[in-house]
Image (cartoon, rainbow, N blue to C red):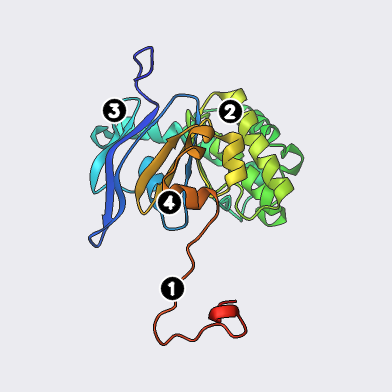
Amino acid sequence: MAEDGTPPALETRGLTVRFGGRAVLDRIDIRIRRGETYVVMGPSGCGKTTLLKCLVRLLPPTEGSVLVDGRDVAGLGPEESDDLRRATGMVFQNGALLNSISLRENVALPMRAHLDMPPGVVEEAVRMKLAQVGLLEAADRMPAELSGGMRKRAGIARALALDPRLVFFDEPTSGLDPVTSDGMDNLVLELKAALGATMVVVTHDLPSARKIADRLVVLSRGRALAEGTWDEVQATTDPEVRGFLDRHAEPPVIGEGATPLVGAPGGMA
């Protein structure tokens, strides 16, 4: 609970996901505060994407629960579930735009599907969303005409179409050059200040996490090993967390009978 007694915007309790007997997530407990940017980090295969799928209700947990505003989403009725979906925006890693329609039409699509708005009002709302992400002049372009960074920003505009109170980002800086990546981080910060929405960002980009996170969690092998501000997580002595933050990997073990790399001292290049 917050100091004023209100529940977290988003919470997991004992969240566990198993595939074929293997625990991909193992009793994850996190609490995401209203209006904060919460970053989920960890090495490849640590469970970040599985956690994201559970949070956006694309994957039911094997055990445990996901709560929004203190309510277990598994117990919501059809109408409440639909309301929650409309209050949730999802920014996919590659934008996930519909290639057969323009950027303007991509952003308008959720409004036309879920809101009873006159065409002129929809058009003005689309202009506002595109202006927020710096793409107003590209409104009539097709997705294939956009750069990678522009597609990601277009995906954000569409995710914001229904003014969600929860916004999820899947690797927003993946595949971007350093300058474009920094611009994406600045956009996330600007949107947070303007919208006040709760944002959950899945990323392996350490500079990005340091810049945008109010708090973050580091996962490894399906477990939450460290949570807190950047400075608090940096202070951890857990060897797995330190290995990820310091970008240090243990050298691979060469099995008996394996052929070492040629020309390296001791057989290693």
Q: Mark 4 or mark 2, which has the lower sequence index?
A: 2
- Badge 3: few (under 14), some or many (20 or more) residues near its Cα, within 10 Å? some
Q: Amino acid at mark 4?
A: Glu
Residue extending furthest toward the right: 137
Query: Separation of disc 3 and disc 4 at Cα?
Result: 33 Å
Secondary structure category for the residue under label 3 = strand
Q: Give coordinates of residue 240: x percent, y percent.
A: 43, 51
Q: Amino acid at mark 2?
A: Lys
Instruction: Between residue 105 and residue 223, name the one nearer to us.
Output: 223
Q: Mark 1 or mark 2, which has the lower sequence index?
A: 2
Q: Give the residue pinned by disc 2.
A: 192
Q: Give coordinates of residue 111: x percent, y percent.
A: 53, 34
Q: Mark 3 or mark 4, which has the lower sequence index?
A: 3
Q: Amino acid at mark 1?
A: Val
Query: Separation of disc 1 and disc 3 at Cα?
Result: 47 Å
Is the C-beta separation of discs 4 and 1 under 8 Å? no
Q: Give the residue pinned by disc 3.
A: 71
- Badge 4: few (under 14), some or many (20 or more) residues near its Cα, within 10 Å? many
Query: Separation of disc 4 and disc 1 at Cα?
Result: 18 Å
Image position of 43 (left or right of 268): left
Pair 4/2: label in front: 4
Pair 3/4: label in front: 4
Q: Give the residue pinned by disc 4.
A: 240
Query: Separation of disc 1 and disc 2 at Cα?
Result: 45 Å
Pair 1/2: label in front: 1
Query: Separation of disc 3 and disc 2 at Cα?
Result: 24 Å
Q: Give the residue pinned by disc 1.
A: 253
Q: Mark 3 or mark 2, which has the lower sequence index?
A: 3
Image position of 250 (left or right of 178): left
Q: Give coordinates of residue 164: x percent, y percent.
A: 49, 30
Q: Residue at x 61, y 55 (%)?
A: 100
